[in-house]
């Protein structure tokens, strides 16, 4: 994580200033007085929480590059989708817990606990001897990630005025640029020369710096309950039970999707029975019918993130097994996306774009559809592989505008004391859609022989061992069955994006902030 290596804390402000969008930086004494995100009032906090996002970004890009090699060595190509969905499944429970925890006593404790669990999960995966133990490590990571992401949203809600929130969201996106380039290159090099395990084992060393930077600033600016004068609020046990239901239900559906036998209908039915009431109880009313305002914001987040991440999870595997790329080159094919995602987030942060936010989000979803639909064209040998890099860069541009905008709109529509619960709803929509769409994509992948891509036994650490499987067991239809349905889901998101703002007729009162159930 280049600008934030341990020991470089004295130069961190300059490193982050290079990564932050220009609009984020204070440009005058007046801006400093008003408290820009790098002004005196917010500098330490901004550096700290962006450091946390840098860690998450580096993990995501590095681990994604090493994942195909890890799955092959552990003889787990058929369980490849589980390695991603296990993270999202456990994070669903952690998101609800984090929202309750943060609204009750502040975001400090869930953030610290989450980062610690995140590092522990990486160590467990990195030392795993079987694919199922590897997946268990990813599940522990998910618990940590769910705690962290909701706690960060509560920090932004409490510590930053509304006018600065688009800028700090753009800063979060900008913090992915360096990891998007360095992460795949470093991970691919380490995977090819030292082995994939070192990718997982080395990352927890980066946990110390975000903790040291973020936690003291959060303690000063965002700790404690939203309303200190109000009596303490107990954890909502009903919501915790629903959180267990949503996590267990999603896990059962994922299992059923990977085990295509008649008996799989039983765990699928049990999963649906747990999932449906839990989702209805945890998401804002009207989410599933795309009611205007907060419900559509929450729904759009799930549609956009789920379709895009489910597709992206299979891009490195497709390039390694179908086109013979090394893990390094397969990972670098997604590197451009970090910069364009940041650009899309920066565009939405410009004050002049605020009146056009709905159009911007709909246009962003159009770019996402185009990207997902274009990627499987490389299954045709005559199509150059660089098409993937270009297409994914375009898709990430749209995602940067959409994801940051959903975050900004959610906080704008949330009462301060419900920022945690509503942020959890947004992240549940994000994580649940990832689980369900990965399950659907994984089932289609397995049904069309995708599990056979890794045929030929357990290989070593090298790229040649992985890419060699592609020649022996090509199943291009299995990949097409993942990407094309995800493009259709993203297409539905174009319509949902037109409903994220509330229409106000002449003489009608302005819309009020929406409380979750």
Image (cartoon, helix red, strand yellow):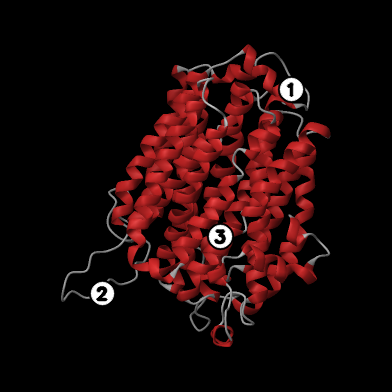
Residue 127 in sight here: no
Q: In terms of sequence position, does the residue under pointer 1 or pointer 3 come before the other?
A: 3
The label number, if any, that marks residue 98 in the structure image? 3
Q: Could you tell me residue 403's position as x and y percent? A: 46, 55
Residue at (45, 39) in percent of width and height = 371
**Left or right side of 464 for 441:** left
Labels 1 and 3 touching (C-beta < 8 A): no
Foreground mark, 2 or 3, reads: 2
Q: CA distance from mark 1 to mark 3?
A: 42 Å
Q: In terms of sequence position, does the residue under pointer 2 or pointer 3 come before the other?
A: 3
Residue at the farthest left position: 507
Callout 1: 10 Å neighbours few (<14), some, many (20+)? some
The label number, if any, that marks residue 464 in the structure image? 1
Q: Could you tell me residue 228's position as x and y percent? A: 53, 81
Callout 2: 10 Å neighbours few (<14), some, many (20+)? few
Q: Nearer the viewer, residue 276 or 384?
A: 384
Q: Could you tell me residue 153's position as x and y percent? A: 53, 64
- Dot 2 corresponds to which residue? 510
């Amino acid at each position: 994580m280049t600008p934030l290596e341990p020991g470089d804390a004295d130069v961190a402000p300059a490193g982050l200033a290079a990564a932050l969008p220009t609009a984020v930086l204070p440009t005058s004494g007046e801006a400093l007085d008003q408290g820009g995100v790098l002004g005196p009032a917010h500098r330490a906090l901004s550096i700290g929480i962006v450091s946390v996002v840098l860690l998450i970004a580096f993990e995501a890009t590095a681990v994604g590059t090493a994942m195909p090699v890890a799955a092959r060595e552990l003889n787990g190509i058929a369980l490849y989708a589980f390695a991603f969905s296990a993270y999202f499944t456990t994070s669903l429970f952690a998101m609800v817990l984090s929202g309750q925890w943060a609204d009750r006593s502040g975001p400090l404790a869930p953030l610290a606990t989450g980062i610690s669990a995140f590092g522990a999960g990486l160590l467990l995966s990195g030392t795993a001897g079987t694919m199922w133990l590897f997946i268990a490590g990813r599940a522990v990571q998910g618990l940590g990630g769910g705690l962290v992401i909701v706690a960060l949203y509560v920090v932004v809600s409490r510590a930053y005025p509304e006018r600065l929130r688009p800028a700090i969201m753009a800063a979060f996106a900008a913090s992915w640029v360096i990891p998007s380039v360095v992460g795949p290159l470093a991970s691919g090099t380490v995977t090819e020369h030292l082995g994939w395990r070192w990718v997982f084992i080395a990352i927890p060393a980066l946990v110390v710096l975000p903790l040291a930077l973020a936690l003291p600033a959060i303690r000063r600016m965002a700790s404690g309950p939203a309303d200190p004068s109000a009596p303490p609020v107990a954890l909502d046990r009903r919501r915790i039970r629903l959180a267990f239901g949503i996590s267990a239900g999603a896990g059962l559906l994922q299992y059923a999707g990977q085990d295509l036998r008649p008996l799989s209908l039983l765990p699928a039915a049990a999963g649906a029975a747990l999932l449906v009431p839990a989702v209805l109880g945890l998401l804002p009313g009207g989410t599933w019918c795309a009611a205007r305002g907060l419900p559509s914001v929450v729904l759009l987040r799930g549609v956009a993130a789920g379709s895009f991440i489910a597709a992206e999870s299979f891009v490195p595997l497709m390039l390694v097994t179908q086109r013979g790329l090394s893990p390094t080159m397969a990972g670098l094919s997604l590197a451009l996306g970090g910069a364009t995602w940041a650009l899309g987030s920066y565009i939405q942060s410009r004050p002049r774009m605020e009146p056009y936010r709905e159009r911007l989000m709909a246009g962003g979803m159009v770019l996402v559809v185009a990207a997902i639909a274009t990627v499987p064209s490389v299954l045709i040998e005559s199509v150059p592989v660089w098409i993937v890099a270009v297409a994914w860069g375009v898709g990430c541009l749209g995602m940067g505008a959409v994801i940051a905008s959903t975050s900004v709109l959610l906080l704008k529509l949330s009462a301060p004391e419900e920022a945690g619960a509503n942020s959890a709803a947004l992240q549940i929509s994000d994580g649940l859609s990832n689980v369900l769409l990965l399950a659907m994509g994984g089932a289609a992948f397995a049904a069309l022989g995708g599990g056979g891509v890794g045929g030929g036994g357990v290989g070593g650490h090298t790229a040649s061992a992985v890419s060699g499987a592609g020649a022996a067991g090509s199943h291009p239809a299995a990949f097409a069955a993942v990407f094309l349905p995800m493009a259709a889901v993203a297409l539905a998101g174009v319509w949902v994006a037109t409903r994220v703002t509330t229409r106000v007729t002449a003489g009608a009162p302005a819309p009020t902030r929406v409380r979750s159930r």
